[in-house]
Amino acid sequence: MSSEHYDTKVSVIVPVYNAAGTLGRCAESILGQTLKSLELIIVDNNSTDDGIDFIQHCARRDPRIKTVICPKQGPNAARNAGLDMAAGEFVFFADADDHLDAGLLEWLIKSAEENRADAVLPAMRHIYMNTEGKVRKATKSALFEREYVGRDAISKAFISALPIRAFYGVFWLYRSAFLKETGTRFDEAQSIGGGLMFNLQILKSLQRMYAVTAPFYNKVHRNGSYSTLYRPDLPEIQAGMRAAIIEYLKRVDAWNDEAQGQLLINDADDLMACAANVLRAQEASLPENKGGLAKLIAERRAGPAELYKHTKGKIGAKRRLFMFAVRHRMYFIIRALKKPY
């Protein structure tokens, strides 16, 4: 572990693109943390709204705020630009749609220091918004609060967390020296799934990890956000992430029956996400949607019938109904549900 001296405890990096409606709350939740030794690095991806103007105005009053324009598009390029500027002993990533509970950073850093951990996973509160901008529902997810030491313990945590996708997000606390020593960077060509690929790089060298069950990182899911855009290459992206997961588990001798079963639950979620993605193309007519869904179903490694059987008792009723509709090509139900979360 590095003995390098840092004047700032944590650098919080927020990539931004046209987030004027949410950036203020995000920034306020970071600057209002009980931990005061922090810097907020806002990396703008050439936004066309006035969100960055507001932040630059705030920066004139609070020297902890730094802003930079990233000419490259995409959140991964923005996160790399933020890493290049970061001066904190730790690094934490947040998205402009999201916000942090007040004591989150202090608790994550305390956990890292007391347990000599190079990465700490926060508890997640997922907030789902309706089209009117009101909260439709909220759910919580977290690993058991404890330290995970060594390759076997960390790989077991990874497997147990596959259904909640705890390793897919990049909303962790990382020790800066560890990131520098391992040369970990974001793949700027990856449009989505950058958090998973970043963390899989981390796992090659990570020996000490910690997870907490509170306070929460609040992940806000809303229509029109970057993660909900239509992506014609989504099945290929998912296939690449699946292959990377299997490669990691095989490398640590953890590609076992439990891992394969947990990954099947992920496959079910991926299938539902792809079905919703097909329907996201608003210009597509129903026959085109049917064709896209049929092609999607035909190309899956595990068919809808197998996934429907395997997920019994493991996913909620609405998602099970969605799986049933996909299995039986009941497109009117698929269109009605769209995304069953």
Image (tube, rainbow, N blue to C red):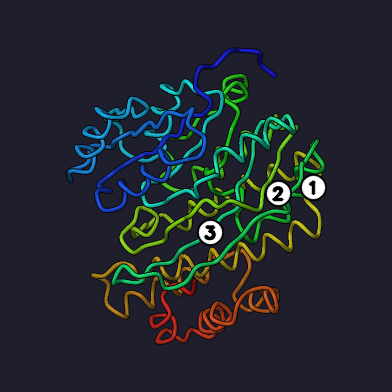
**Secondary element type, mark 2:** helix
Judging depth in this view, the residue of 44 and 193 nearest the camera is: 44
- The tag earlier along the polypeptide, 1 or 3, is 3
Say which amino acid is labelled 3. Answer: Arg
Give coordinates of residue 160: x percent, y percent. Answer: 73, 56
What is the distance, in whole Å, between disc 1 and disc 3 at their CAs?
Answer: 29 Å
Marks 1 and 2: CB-CB under 8 Å?
A: yes
Residue 254, labelled with which disc? 1
- Residue 282, by quadrant, is bottom left
Give the CA separation, mark 1 to mark 2. 10 Å
Q: Which residue is mark 2?
A: 158
- Relative to residue 82, is residue 240 depicted above or below? below
Residue closest to the eye, 235 or 187: 187
Q: Earlier in the sequence, mark 3 or mark 2?
A: 3
Helix, strand or loop at disc 3?
strand
- Given this view, does label 1 or label 3 mark the residue nearer the observer? 3
Is residue 143 depicted above or below 296 in this figure? Answer: above
Residue that label 3 marks: 125
